[in-house]
Structures are given as structure tokens and as C-alpha cells.
Image (cartoon, grey):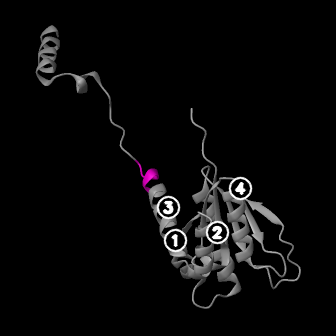
Amino acid sequence: MSKQRKKLLIVDGYNVLRSGSRYQRIAGPDYTDDAFNAAREALVNDVVNFAGRDWRAIIVFDGAKNQFSTGEAQSVGGVRIVFSPAGQSADKVIEKLAHDARERQVETLVVTSDATIQDTVFGFGVDRMSANGFSREIALYYEDAHLDETPKVAQKNTVAARIDPSTLAKLRALRDAAR
């Protein structure tokens, strides 16, 4: 049996929230704290669902201007959530994670619409997906999940269904004659 490939999904958190159509709709035009938190929560849930068992996932948010940000990760639903440490941009953290993953020969996908990050990680040989591309993938994921849950009519598997119609007619005639 072949060994399953390692995969890493790195998501540029704030970039996806601001650029992904799915999250723009949730946050609305005003970006109030409540709406933005709802969009952030939706992103975390979406990454948890998208990553599933196939990907290890990390969402990186920018904490550079927060003097209390240490860069420590926390885990939600198996997804690591990292705020970059004070004084360091999320871009640098993402680039380092992508570079280190490729050095370890881990298949890596970075989700961002930031052209600079896309160009940098592409230079490492890392795949990339735009924020809107991710929004579309998530929509397809939920559509497929919804279709999987629609009730299906169970078909009866009877002997009569598998017998040639002319043979079935003869058997019925024999049965009816025996009554």
C-alpha cells in the first residue's frame, strides 16, 4: 500500500477575510467587530471542514502591530491558528511556513490574494489559491455535502427484479396454477 502524501494548507487569514467573496458577504460593508468576528469564525469553520483528514491546516493572522502578540499557535478543530508575533507580518510567517514545508517535501497550498506572497511561495514551488478561489471551493464543498444528505429512495433488491421477464411470467403462472 502506498504511503499517503503529507499536505499542508496555509491560509492568509485577514487577506482571505477581506478578499474572499464569501467572507465579504458575512462581514458586510461596515466591518463591525461582530460582523468581522462572524466572518473570522466562518473562515475557521470552513478551513476545518475543507482540510478534513487530507490536510494539516494553519491560518495565519497578522499580529504585527499588537505588542502583546507572541506568535503562539492555538488549535481549533485540528486547525492551528497563529497571530504573527509583534513586529512581524503575517506575510513573513506564511513565507517561512511555506519555505520550511517545501524543504521537508510537504505538498503545500497557500490561500491568499496577496500578489507578493503568491509570487514568493510560487518561487518555492508551492501551490497557491486566491481568496475567491477558496470561497468557490468552500461553496462547492458545502453543496456536495448538502447533496450527500438528501434522502434517497432505497431500491428493493428482490429475486424477481433480477430474473428475465419471460422466466418470471412462467414462474408466476406455475405459482398461480398451484393455488
Q: What residue sits right under mark 1 in the picture?
A: 135
Disc 4 on helix, strand or loop?
Answer: loop
Task: Confirm whether the magenta stretch covers residue 174.
Answer: no
Q: What residue sits right under mark 4 in the picture?
A: 78
Disc 3 on helix, strand or loop?
Answer: helix
Task: Tell me: residue 63, above or below residue 129.
Answer: below
Sequence-first disc among 2 and 1: 2
Q: Nearer the viewer, mark 2 or mark 4?
A: 2
Q: Are marks 2 and 4 in contact (CB under 8 Å)?
A: no
Q: Position of residue 54 (x, y in %)?
A: 60, 50
Sequence-first disc among 3 and 4: 4
Q: Which residues are magenta?
A: 147-151
Please state which amino acid type lies under the numbered disc 2.
Answer: Val
Task: Confirm whether the magenta stretch covers residue 150.
Answer: yes
Sequence-first disc among 1 and 3: 1
Name the residue furthest right: 68
User: 143 left or right of 50?
Assistant: left
Q: What residue sits right under mark 3 in the picture?
A: 142
Q: Position of residue 60 (x, y in %)?
A: 71, 71
Please state which amino acid type lies under the numbered disc 3.
Answer: Tyr
Tag of residue 11: 2
Name the residue furthest front: 123
